[in-house]
């Protein structure tokens, strides 16, 4: 068996393990009925009927939750790509109500951890990570069961289904973007990611920085082609003890840069991204009469006044989102229906996945520094939009918006170089237990006592 076959075989094993666990934890009705928030199935049904709107009011079982209303027409405002996955399901069933949409997304959910394993293996092959295949396998399974992706995969409803598709596309994007190996496919995955979860568009820095790295390694200009004066300056700037300042070092780097290759890689990458943006703008124009109107201001939700005043993204929301993401812990109760309770705004990220704390003290090898920097820049570029967003992710077990960059964080764990010792193992066991609890109890009526669902209450009151 070749190394490639072994990697693909282990990726398939991760998928099968994930499939068994995700189906095992699923609510019975997820496997036998449609979810109450089957927006993507309703959207797919509209497409099959030749329309972009629902054709009437949303079904009563949806509680009119998160639909956009313009005049007498109702729309699904969420980025539409996950509905593509449901198109054949709706066509075969004959209607949106005939589709078990929760089950459909359960079949898809284990693909992201499997692709993440291929990402981690590629980092090892490129010399950017020193993790063994066993460690990469463990990290991929921890992503599947030790993060909020676990409870997200179990829901199947519109908000969580988008995360299942988004994580898969982000993992594929990182796989193709590393070493700038597949620019067209990387751009396609990023464009499709934007059509699934808008913040994923801002993962573009990873590819951009990888292109700069590969196009400046070796360079397009040979030493014999440079004048002697330029050779001297280049050698001086490259020398650790040389007197070349930052400007000279930048000029030397610019001379080495393979500009023709750089432009070619960026062009192939930009082509599918531009196509995805064009389709999105056309879609907006066809529905709402304006290319840059995504429909969120037409949502019939209780946050409408807040969005009208501050907008979808604003510094106003940052403090609250940071507070919930970093400080929300279970409530210890006395004499209540449950021994502890979890706020519907979700538990702190470090509590559900304490392994992320290992990101704070990396031990980087020389080969890992560049990609480590690129991954952090990309993570912050994506996370910034969720931290400035008007919504915490409500209602949730943990910070579901972290799914938008969790793949990047696990890549950082791989390149970080710290030994995955006893402390990491203990944190991992804790994470799996916590997230298994969330995956099993969240949104189940019999466990409702464990959750506090008060939209404007972010922490336990005094």
Image (tube, grey):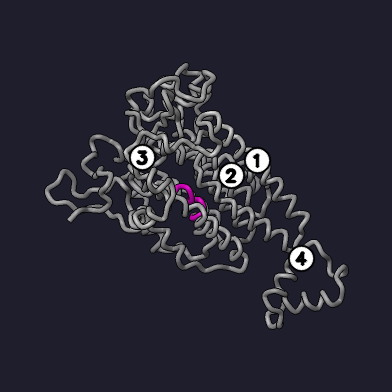
Q: Which residue is mark 4?
A: 256
Q: Which residue is mark 2?
A: 190
Image height of 97 relative to 285, above or below: above
Q: Is residue 97 magenta?
A: no
| Quadrant location, the N terminus | top right
Give the residue displayed 68% in from the left and 50% down from the top: 181
The residue mark sitting in front, 1 or 3, is: 3
Q: What whole-number distance in Å separates the C-alpha atoms at marks 4 and 1?
A: 29 Å
Give 75 or 432, whichever is nearer the viewer. Answer: 75
Q: Position of residue 250 (x, y in %)?
A: 70, 70
Q: What whole-number distance in Å separates the C-alpha atoms at marks 2 and 3?
A: 30 Å
Drawn side of residue 52 relative to residue 30, left or right:
right
Helix, strand or loop at disc 3?
Answer: helix
- Decide whether the magenta segment is chiefly helix, strand or loop: helix
In which image quadrant can residue 254 be found? bottom right
Q: Which residue is mark 3?
A: 304
Which stretch did the figure color magenta?
Answer: 403-409
Q: What whole-number distance in Å separates the C-alpha atoms at marks 2 and 4?
A: 29 Å
Q: What whole-number distance in Å separates the C-alpha atoms at marks 4 and 3?
A: 53 Å
């Amino acid at each position: 068996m070749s190394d490639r076959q072994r990697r693909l075989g282990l990726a398939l094993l991760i998928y099968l393990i994930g499939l068994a666990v995700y189906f095992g934890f699923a609510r019975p009705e997820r496997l036998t009925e449609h979810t109450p928030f089957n927006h993507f199935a309703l959207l797919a049904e509209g497409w099959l009927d030749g329309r972009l709107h629902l054709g009437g009011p949303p079904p009563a079982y949806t509680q009119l939750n998160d639909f956009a209303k313009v005049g007498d027409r109702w729309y699904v405002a969420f980025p539409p790509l996950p509905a593509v996955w449901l198109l054949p399901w709706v066509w075969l069933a004959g209607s949106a109500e005939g589709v078990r949409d929760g089950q459909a997304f359960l079949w898809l959910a284990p693909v992201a951890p499997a692709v993440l394993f291929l990402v981690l293996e590629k980092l090892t092959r490129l010399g950017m990570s020193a993790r063994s295949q066993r460690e990469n396998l463990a990290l991929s399974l921890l992503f599947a069961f030790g993060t909020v992706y676990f409870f997200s995969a179990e829901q199947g409803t519109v908000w969580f289904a988008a995360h299942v598709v988004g994580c898969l596309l982000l993992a594929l994007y990182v796989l193709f973007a590393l070493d700038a190996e597949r620019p067209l496919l990387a751009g396609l995955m990023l464009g499709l990611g934007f059509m699934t979860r808008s913040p994923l568009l801002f993962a573009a820095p990873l590819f951009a920085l990888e292109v700069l790295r590969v196009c400046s390694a070796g360079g397009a200009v040979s030493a014999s082609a440079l004048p002697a004066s330029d050779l001297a300056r280049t050698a001086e700037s490259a020398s650790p003890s040389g007197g070349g300042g930052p400007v000279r070092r930048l000029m030397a780097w610019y001379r080495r840069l393979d500009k023709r290759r750089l432009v070619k890689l960026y062009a192939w990458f930009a082509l599918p991204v531009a196509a995805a943006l064009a389709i999105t703008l056309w879609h907006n124009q066809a529905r709402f009469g304006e290319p840059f109107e995504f429909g969120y201001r037409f949502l019939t939700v209780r946050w409408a006044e807040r969005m009208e005043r501050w907008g979808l993204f604003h510094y106003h929301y940052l403090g609250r989102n940071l507070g919930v993401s970093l400080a929300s812990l279970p409530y210890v109760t006395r004499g209540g229906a449950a021994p502890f309770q979890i706020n519907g705004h979700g538990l702190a990220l470090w509590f559900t996945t304490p392994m992320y704390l290992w990101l704070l003290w990396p031990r980087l090898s020389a080969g890992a520094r560049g990609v480590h920097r690129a991954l952090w820049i990309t993570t912050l570029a994506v996370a910034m939009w969720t931290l400035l967003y008007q919504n915490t992710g409500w209602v949730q077990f943990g910070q579901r918006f972290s799914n938008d960059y969790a793949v990047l964080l696990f890549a950082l764990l791989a390149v970080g170089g710290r030994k995955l010792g006893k402390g990491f193992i203990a944190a991992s066991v804790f994470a799996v237990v916590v997230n298994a609890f969330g995956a099993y109890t969240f949104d189940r009526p019999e466990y409702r006592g464990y959750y506090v669902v008060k939209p404007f209450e972010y922490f336990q009151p005094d």
